[in-house]
Image: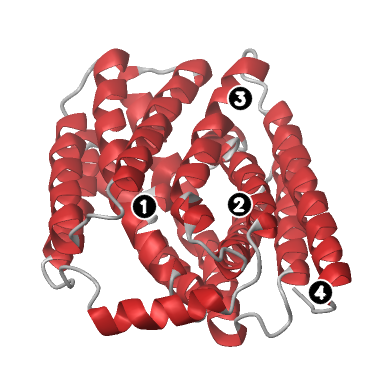
Amino acid sequence: MTGVQPIFVGLLADRIGLSIDSVALLLGAEQFGLVAGATLGFGRLRHYRLTRWVFSAGTLAAIASAATALAGTLPVLMALRFIVGMAVGAAYTVSVFALGRSAKPDRAYGLILFAQTLLWAIYAPILPLLASRLGAAAAILSTSLWFILVAICALGLPQREDRETVGEIRQIAETRPANRPAWFGLAGMFLLQVSIYAQWGFLERVGKDAGMTPETVGWAFGIGLLGGLPGGMLPALIADRFGHRWPIAIGTVTVIAADLLFALAPSPAMHFLLAVFLLNFGWVLALAYYMGFIALFDRTGSATRLISMVQTLGTAFGPVSVALIVSGNNLRPIFLLSSVAAGIGILLIMWVIAQENRMTGKKA
């Protein structure tokens, strides 16, 4: 649901009249639910059954998401979104860990990010249309269908890795370098997530403040989310052929460019659409290569196990940091925070890759 979160949160905010700081608290509750779910999933990685785990998580998320449509107060909403986040975080942790153990993690992560972006782009214009024709409650209720679909798809997953696959994974792990760069990769990825989620839940309000209707914002998001398709397809096609440094740098600079467009009050709608497109392209491209970089340098698997937890920590810290620095309805500090976090992340990863190249003589 991340891709349509700004529209979804906008529906919740309009339905019960939430202020910006209350929206930030609501976003924070769901993201800290993700942290709790990722922690739970991390503790079960050695013993998980993929089908049972994802099916249970999808079912729980569907029930809590459906109940969200009936909630009328902020505390109840926060509790329900925490439960949704916890279920999603648990399923996501085991999925990311399984993909990270493949021979080409950049390609695997790129493909999954491509697929999720395509689904977001389809659903983004549908959600406000449902709200305008059937009401906000019906639109909010429709989000539970995605989690039902996740639970159904889980029934086709293998119960656990077979012995042949485990043997291949061990051979791959023995060829990988030391773990040190992977931990710096986790730090850079955390800052990227802070950068994105400091602004993500507020973009619907940016569009409305620029004079756009909810339907126009939905269509702009639907088209703008398509930026994630080339962002995910590039790593899926080229993997690590050109290393990790420059794809991460290109993605980060694109995110900062999108921040600038948003801060300049995007109007007309085409400016808003372009900013969303650039933001998603840069985000998905940089995220895929951050995740691939971590998996590549993670000889023991310890850093890869933490990918989802670190992502969700960054996702939670973003909106909470907004609640601390924003007063009233001034949104511009959000985009400054986003740019600074993304900039520090790329400087960190450029430094550690340069150090690794100098030590090994290889291009990372």
**Dot label at residue 93:** 1
Is 70 drawn above or below residue 249 in the view shown?
above
| Mark 4 or 1: the one toward you | 4
* Residue at position x 68%, y 45% in the image: 266
Sequence-first tag of 2 and 4: 2
Mark 4 element type: helix
Residue that badge 4 annotates: 360
Q: CA distance from mark 3 to mark 4?
A: 40 Å
Q: How is the image coloured?
A: secondary structure
| Nearer-the-camera pick, 98 or 15 | 98
Is 131 drawn above or below residue 270 in the view shown?
above
Residue that badge 3 annotates: 322
User: In this rendering, does residue 208 appear at all?
Assistant: no
| Mark 1 or 3: the one toward you | 1
Mark 2 element type: helix
Identified by mark 2, the residue type is Ala
